[in-house]
Amino acid sequence: MVRPKSIELIVALVAGLCGMGAQGGLTARLPGFLVAAEQKSNSIVAIDARQAGAPAWAWEWNAANDSGIAKGDAKFFNAPSDCKVISTKEGDAVLMIASGGNFAEISLATGRAVCYGHIGGNPHSITRLPSAGRVYATASSVSHVVTLVDVTDNPFKPDLQPKRAFPLYDAHGVEWDANRGCLWALGGTNLVQYAWDEAQFDLRPVRSYDYRPVGSRSGHDLVPDGKGGYFLSTWKHLMHFSPDEGRFTVVLNQGEIKAYSPNVTWGDAFTIVREVWWTDRILVRKGGEERVIGPYPGTKFYKARWMR
């Protein structure tokens, strides 16, 4: 596995190029860099993906090395299943969630969690909802629920955080739609639109779209297309969904896509299963050509997203 051995080496490799923060974080999201959920080390890592190859990781977060995570809770961050870079009023951050049951929001600037919580049920996706505090929606595939979690008053005490669960078969993906003011959640057969009521801490189903007549079942990844629509991966296909038309279209006849991240400038990033449910490389396709980020022998990438 190609990994830097110390924070000093990370600074030497990417200082200036990446705009490193004083504590080993990144001052902002970086164009042409990916964040990835890496299950061998149970870490979230950032990788320079502007060229093919296997550069040293530019940034890494691991719950076991974060002093804000209670020692007994670190084990619930095993097998990270999703990661997303978001912009907040406090600065850029990474949202992550793990199959072990825990999630966290991590400041890019400090490289430390600003909060974390526990869901369980094999969670696969997380999004932050508009709120006066910190409220998240998560999707868990084994418990078949979309869960609301409010960490505002207890950012580091999962047992004290209010939660509310809503049934969704084989729930795998959640994304907040700022333009439409709604939550989209991807299940095993349907993509569901929810209205978010902050005052009542409630989600109300608005409409459900069955994608099986167009493509296969077992929805896995849900990602915005940057133009108001969404891409979703299923057991056998990559599809596009147009909310205004309520229409699904097959984009690619490719199965086992754990994550898809489109980017006009850098290309479309894929994590596609090579062994069991993981891969040791990330594929980037642009203009009919493909470059390989990796391979990183021994790694277990699950999902990868462009920072910007």
Image: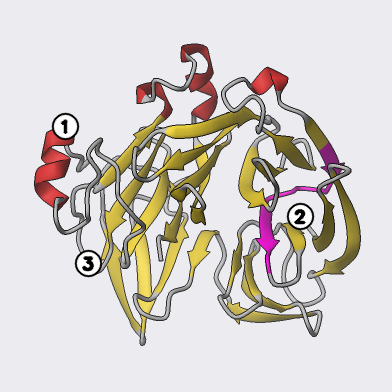
Q: In screen coordinates, is 303 left or right of 24?
A: right
Q: Amino acid at mark 3?
A: Ala
Q: For the residue labelled by badge 2, is the local secondary structure a helix, a strand or a loop? A: loop
Q: For the residue labelled by badge 1, is the local secondary structure a helix, a strand or a loop? A: loop
Residue 273 x, y percent position in the rendering: 47, 54
Q: For the residue labelled by badge 3, is the local secondary structure a helix, a strand or a loop? A: loop
Any magenta on residue 175? yes
**Distance in Å between CA atoms under marks 2 and 3:** 34 Å
Q: Amino acid at mark 2?
A: Gly
**Distance in Å between CA atoms under marks 1 and 3:** 24 Å
Q: In screen coordinates, is 259 left or right of 135?
A: left
Instruction: Magenta stretch: give its range.
Output: 165-178
Q: Amino acid at mark 1?
A: Ser
| Mark toward the viewer: 2 or 1 | 1
Q: Which residue is mark 2?
A: 187
Residue at horizontal 68 percent and vertical 31 percent from the top: 119
Q: Which residue is mark 1?
A: 6
| Quarter of the figure that contains the N terminus | top left
